[in-house]
Image (tube, rainbow, N blue to C red):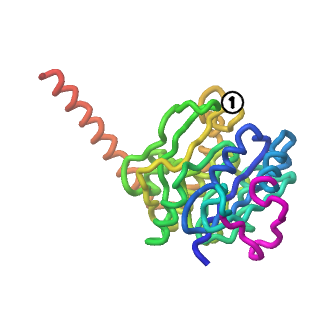
Amino acid sequence: MSKIISIVTPSYNQGTFISNTIKSIISQEGDFYIDYIIQDGGSTDNTLDVISYFEHKVLLGSRRQREFDHEWLAPAADDSIIRCRGVSFRWQSGKDGGQSQAINKGFGKARGGFAGWVNSDDSLLPGALTRVAGLFERQDSVYFGKSRATDQDGNEKWIQDFWKTKYTFYDSFYLGYTPPQPSVFFPLDLYRNLGGLDENLHYMLDTDLWQRMLLKVGYFSYVPEIWSIQTYHPASKSMQGDRLFSAFEGEKKKLRKIRVRQIGNKRVLYQLRFSLRTIYLKLLDLLKKLYHLGG
């Protein structure tokens, strides 16, 4: 069988956005199968109605998919929403311990060789999985691209970009850079070997996973292409508190203490590198100011 890409969507009361999320994933075009799993936490809004619509009306029609290996939904002769080799569409709804646990449950059922998760208020851009599948065909790595941040009305706020070809633990731990989560794709075996997400974390869950992956594999490969859209709206975790990401601060401090213990003697080298970089940037800034004064 051709390549299988597993995508998990953790969901809870995001009926306003989840239709775009689902459509953006199952309509990806390419020579691969999509193993799509929605893990819902017991939504009480219209989320389950939206999921059921895609299951019964758009994807399956009058047929119900039974076992994962029994039947793949292949593209129809007409203008089907399915444009890859086939889609497995599975979902479950019930109370859980939060986003981290939902994602772990989803990946516990996954069958793909590589994977990523897309939250129920985010989406993938057309062609994203085509590009990712091609990259994994050449080299088994962790890949990430850019992401476009928008508000709830779809207005662009910024592009989450990066500045070099490789992302390392140093970039994460000292410089505070974080790849845009829905644009990160990784080998599923790597995720499982590391034990998946820490279910005690509700804000820094992705950063914690990236750092553990980085300590294991050394670096992530950056691709300067926009692969996803992240929606920042009043109900999103990123906008809780008095400023953007302020709710993350408590877990951020706890995570830093854990990493300090883990990296041990390497911390001195990281700190030296950080200090030298800081001095270099200050000298560069001073030289620019002197140049402008002299001009």
| Rendered position, 253 above or below 240 | below
Question: In percent of the image, x 62 and y 70: which residue is there?
Answer: 4
Q: Which image quarter holds the C terminus?
A: top left
Query: Residue 26: x and y, percent?
Result: 66, 56
Can see residue 21? yes
Q: Main secondary structure of the magenta part?
A: loop
- Outermost residue on the front side: it is 78
Query: Residue 30: x and y, percent?
Result: 55, 63
Q: Quadrant of residue 193?
A: bottom right
The three-letter amino acid code for the residue at tag 1 is: Pro
| Rendered position, 23 above or below 249 | below
84 or 8, which lies in front?
Answer: 84
Can see residue 260? no
Q: Is residue 58 magenta?
A: yes
Question: In percent of the image, x 52 and y 40: which residue is there?
Answer: 148
- Which stretch is magenta? 57-75
Question: In percent of the image, x 77 and y 52: which residue is there?
Answer: 54
264 or 131, which lies in front?
Answer: 131
Query: Residue 73: x and y, percent?
Result: 72, 66
- Outermost residue on the bottom side: it is 1
Q: Is residue 26 magenta?
A: no
30 or 187, which lies in front?
Answer: 30
